[in-house]
Amino acid sequence: FSMNRKIKAAYIKFNDHDCPNFTYCAMLLGLMAQIINKLKSYDYGYIFSDPVDPNDAPNYHDIIKTPMDYSTIMSKLEDGGYAEFAAMRNTNERNDSVDNEVDSQTAMERILCGVIRDINQVFHNCLVFNSESTSFYRAAEVHIRKWEAYLNHFVIHRLPQNVRRFIETINLSEPSMQSKEIKPTPNAVKELEDIKTVVKSDKKTIENSANEIATGAETAEMDVREVAEDAIEVKLDESIKSKHGQINSFSERPDTNSTPDDISAAPLLQSRPWTDQ
């Protein structure tokens, strides 16, 4: 890798006895600039090349407190914007166990850590703001893998030991400087309240419908019971009438044990002669 003269000039003030590895670190910053340019031209690189437009994502800055993109990193590299990191005593605020090691970093090593942290921030912002089902989230995963490939193949073995230790303490897809805890925006809160109202209204409607169905079922049961009782009464009436008719027919038959008044028993007596012996 070669020297980027513009980047070297931007940080020339750190070329003193407190930063003996200035030239080497300046060359590493030039290498980082080359990698960023390759990421910009890689698949979906346009997504991460420029700041997010608030018109495209109105609530973006309510959720993302540290916006970052490839073009901003390049501008800070070339304009000396990372000089602020040189004065930082701890570039990894999450892990206090490495404070002593970070304190031993030179100014240019801290600047290198700042660049790596900002690249990491680009991906983290995208993963936080977008859901896993979106193309933006998948694009971030693609660029994380590409960035890690560049880092492992071209950068890691060249980094000063202090910077390498810093990289080992962070997750490249989850930077330390921003919590993943996200406070809901006012619009999101209002939408949630609206959903709760609709759900409550729907629940009341369902309860009313259930009560109406239950009442209807009770009414139907009573109607069925009344019809059944009416059917039983009709059947009973028919049975009673049938039995009453049979009784009447029995009463109209002649009594075979009785002798009618108009039949004389004399001929019967006369038909059998009497003999006196």
Image (cartoon, rainbow, N blue to C red):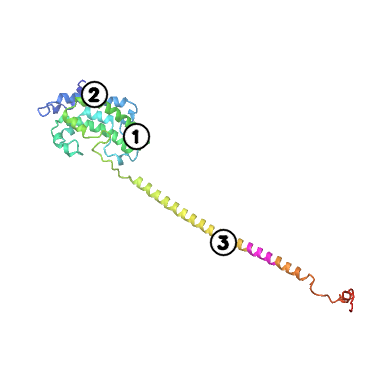
**Does residue 185 appear left or right of residue 271 in this picture?**
left
Front residue of 193 and 174: 174
Residue 147 locus on image (x, y percent): 28, 28
Residue density around tag 1, few if under 14, some if 14–19, many if 20 or more, within 10 Å: some
Residue 115 locus on image (x, y percent): 22, 30
Q: Disc 3, disc 2: CB below 8 Å? A: no
Q: Quadrant of the C terminus?
A: bottom right
Q: CA–CA distance between discs 1 and 2?
A: 26 Å
Q: Which residues are magenta?
A: 231-240
Q: Give the residue number, with chain letter if any, for mark 2.
A: 154
> Compared with residue 168, is residue 235 higher up or lower down, i.e. above or below?
below
In the orientation shown, which residue stands out farthest toward the top? Answer: 2
Residue density around tag 3, few if under 14, some if 14–19, many if 20 or more, within 10 Å: few
Q: Disc 1, disc 2: CB below 8 Å? A: no
Q: Main secondary structure of the magenta part?
A: helix
Front residue of 60 and 274: 274
Q: Amino acid at mark 1?
A: Tyr
Q: Give the residue number, with chain letter if any, for mark 1.
A: 137
Q: Quadrant of the N terminus?
A: top left
Viewer can see residue 49: no
Please report whichever mark, 3 or 2, sits nearer to the chain's N-terminal start: 2
What SS does tag 2 mark? helix
Number of the front mark, 3 or 2: 3
In the orientation shown, which residue stands out farthest toward the bottom? Answer: 276
Q: CA–CA distance between discs 3 and 2?
A: 86 Å
Residue 177 locus on image (x, y percent): 23, 38
What SS does tag 3 mark? helix
Q: Give the residue number, with chain letter if any, for mark 3.
A: 222
Q: Is residue 239 magenta?
A: yes
Q: Amino acid at mark 3?
A: Met
